[in-house]
Amino acid sequence: MTDPGTIVIVGGGHNGLVCAASLARAGRKVLVLEAADQVGGAAVTREFSPGFRVSSGAHLLHALDPVVERTLKLASHGLAFARTGLNTVALGAGDPLILNGAQVLAGEVSATDRLALAQYVSRQRRYAALLARQHGRIPSRLGAGFSVIRLFGGGANNRITENPAPMPWSLAKFAFDLRRLGRADMRELLRVGTMPLYDLLEDRFENAQLKGALALDGVLGARLGPRSGQTFFTSLQRAGAYGLPRGGMGTVTGALAIAARAAGAEIRVSSPVASIRVATREDGGEHVTGVVLESGEEIAAVTVVSNADPKTTFLKLLGARHLDAEFVRRVQHFRTEGCAAKLHLALDGVPQFRGVPSAQLGERVIIAPDLGYIEAAFNPAKYREFSPAPVLEITVPSLHDPGLAPPGKQVLSAVVQYAPCDLAGGWDAGRPRFLAATLDVLTRYAPGLRAQILDAELLTPVDLEREFRITGGHWHHGELALDQFMMLRPVQGAAQYATPLEGLFLCGAGSHPGGGVMGSAGRNAARVVLAGRRT
Amino acid sequence: MTIPREHYLQAVFPTPFHPRTAAVNTLNVWHRWRDYTVADAYFDVALEYTALRNACTVFDLSPMTKHLITGPDALAFMNRLVTRDVAKVKPGRVGYTVWCDDAGQVVDDGTIFHLRDHVYRLCSQERQLDWLLGSSHGFDVSIVEETHDVAALALQGPTSCALLKRLGLAGIETLAPFGMRSFAFEGGELMVSRTGFTGDLGYELWIDPELAVPLWDRLFDVGQVVGVKPMGTLALEMSRIEAGFIQAGVDFLPADRAIRADRTRSPFELDLEWLVDFRKGSFTGRRALLEERTRGSRYRLVKLDVEGNKPAKDAFIYDRRRRNVGVVTSALWSPAAKANIALASVQMPFGAPGDELWAEIYYQKELKWSRFMARCTVVEGAFFNPARRRVQPAGDC
């Protein structure tokens, strides 16, 4: 029998573990229930072929919350890097282009493009820093009558909002940060913030490979093409430097688990939660009383924090009947259609990409040769078909981290797009065909690759959904777009980590600031739980 | 008779009773009610109203939006949808209710007919199928709009029970208010509920559209002796204000149609607190309504007894003749109450029972407009509430 004062965390992904560690450090009793046989959620390392291990979900670390890293002392709990600051090697028709931030390390790039790149990257970093400043803030709650126009000082005669709500605090801070960008940067952000990258990049750059490489940042993990609106905004989520944790992503969550246990949290694996238990008080009010595991075991708790995605949490574990109808409708409309697949290859040797110097083979290699190629790859996804010639983000982590593969062998890990989760005809039939298409593209750039393949695993969004229990297999738990951002993430009414149901909180990537292995959502959720806040 | 639904050929349809209502509509005035054409009045609004209060009238209710809700979770679904405890509406009973959005603002009002276990009919003023389907996620229910499949008449007035007895509905006088009962009628089923929108003794008759015309004919065959008349919407409007009933789109704006945040009303703000049952468990709007109960409401709906005889239609309401605190939503000079009555929405804290308010009334005589400030008293209870409405067994007149 568990102490009902224990806080139960449903799911031991990175955010669940950060939340657990933060709560335990504050002296609360915490029990983490993880469905899989190891913690980590989609930030794990696992064997996919005998002797070959890979980060089976996220494979690059670029957004880990520095506050999490520092306060939970992850370095002392085992987090080490095999490589940081990876270059980007953009393959294309000609010689590969090698980039690192604003620097062009190789490739035929004009002086004009180099200057434009320096300006573009520097501005993007300022904007990304502006967003990063919001990561640790609890999003504002927008009441009825709130006018976004007032954010920019206008709206005195806005007739729609005759009784405007007061300016919420964290939104006011965001507005202040926006102003602090300075006039030119703020205006530019407001101008391009919702623009498609296609237009923006065509305006500023000449080199097709360069444009392709920059565009990829806006579409990776999203159901968007370069011509889709707001891809400039989505690209800001990937402005950090890329790192490879030693031992794969499992090291990050492993360190988090150690930190959580060290702080006193209990973690149970292979304990999938079937439902969140609710009771009705005498006055008719409903509140959480614990969880029921798939095994039938009941665990009492007055506080349950869900690291599961919002649709799973509200519609499967809790049940719509405990929530207001419009809230449920908003949750149903939260866009969770994953479009990225994950390819793992066990290789008999180092893959040789044409024209890529051997010293660069372990960098972040991308196949997004030009804007038209990416858009053409995206088009079929709109009609529930996969890309006949997909775009790829490739790493060979074993080059930096030999422990991942047997001696002399290598592991290739790639994000492959576009692979709509709701593929027409289903993924059982589609998987081998998409694998063939992916290998065709890969061998176009690495002609000897096919002969090196010892084993291959392709995780489509359906497989990711099954393996990580994420609706739609979406690695952000839901599209990270402007309409699902900050106080709108996941939906109005649950955007401050507390939910409409007393005692139930969210802490996953479906909440602000979203996915990528960041940990900010878990940290913010813990603050809300500790403050005893309710929606 | 099957109602054609080729809406691209015809936007507005005749009701199943149209062959008869058209024949007796000597004024030939019609208006559109949702998908149907209905009569404003048949021969004389005042006389139709007088027939209602002194004999009985038949009103064509067919365009009323009707939904059939069935399935193992029907009760759970209904309870999550509406503010009152539907478990207390037993099979064979009818309950008036409202339902709210998440913000606790009224989407619509209507009546729940508990036809039998796991089967409910929900009648509403507005179209609600989208709202109902949107509310059904996670419930094992089937929701069908059956507006076109059920013809309905309101038979209202002091001699309505007598008429039904003459129609051969044995024991109809024992039917309690908000009860319903089925009878055989010409090979089909006639469902009769002791409900209505007039505040008088009265019944609503629900039948297959195929039997609509025979039902109308029978009612008028046997009803001549008790003075039955057809009644149009204008006379109904008079009677519902006298009864103190509110109407969607008139006395409140359905929340899903409102753009401006302060235009909607909660059940508390419509004097419907008695319909809100917090203890039954979760329902849409519960949290917001609890908060409102703590924080206080913004408005209240009041019944006003207005000085003079000029209807206070659309009048602004003032506190001590100076400050504008509200507006009249429905008003008329009531022949039954012999009073100048109004429903008004006023800001809190104005309009407590017994308070004095002022109505700014504009009226014209022979195209000359005048204005005067009428003293109003806030009154409680229906303006017209005869004992015959409730008495059991129902009387003959």
Image (cartoon, rainbow, N blue to C red):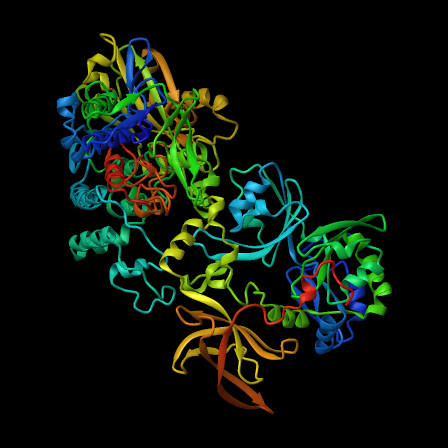
What residue is rendered at 47% in x and 25% in y? A427
Q: Is residue A92 visible?
A: no
Q: Nearer the viewer, residue A256 or A55?
A: A256
Image coords of residue B230 (percent x, y): 76, 69
Image coords of residue B138 (percent x, y): 51, 37
Quadrant occupied by the C terminus of chain B:
bottom right
Q: Is residue A101 visible?
A: yes
Report whether A24 appears left or right of A227: left
Q: Please tell me whether residue B331 is drawn above or below residue A470 in the rendered image.
A: below
Q: Nearer the viewer, residue B88 or B328?
A: B88
Q: Please tell me whether residue B367 is drawn above or below residue A476 in the rendered image.
A: below
Q: Based on the displayed image, in which of its 4 quarters is residue A50 positioned?
A: top left
Q: Nearer the viewer, residue B124 or A389?
A: B124
Image coords of residue A231 (percent x, y): 32, 43
Q: How many marks?
A: 0
Image coords of residue B108 (percent x, y): 54, 57
Report whether A262 appears left or right of A347: left
Q: Based on the displayed image, in which of its 4 quarters is residue A376 positioned?
A: top left
Q: Please tell me whether residue B127 is drawn above or below residue B32 in the rendered image.
A: above
Q: Nearer the viewer, residue A522 or A52?
A: A522
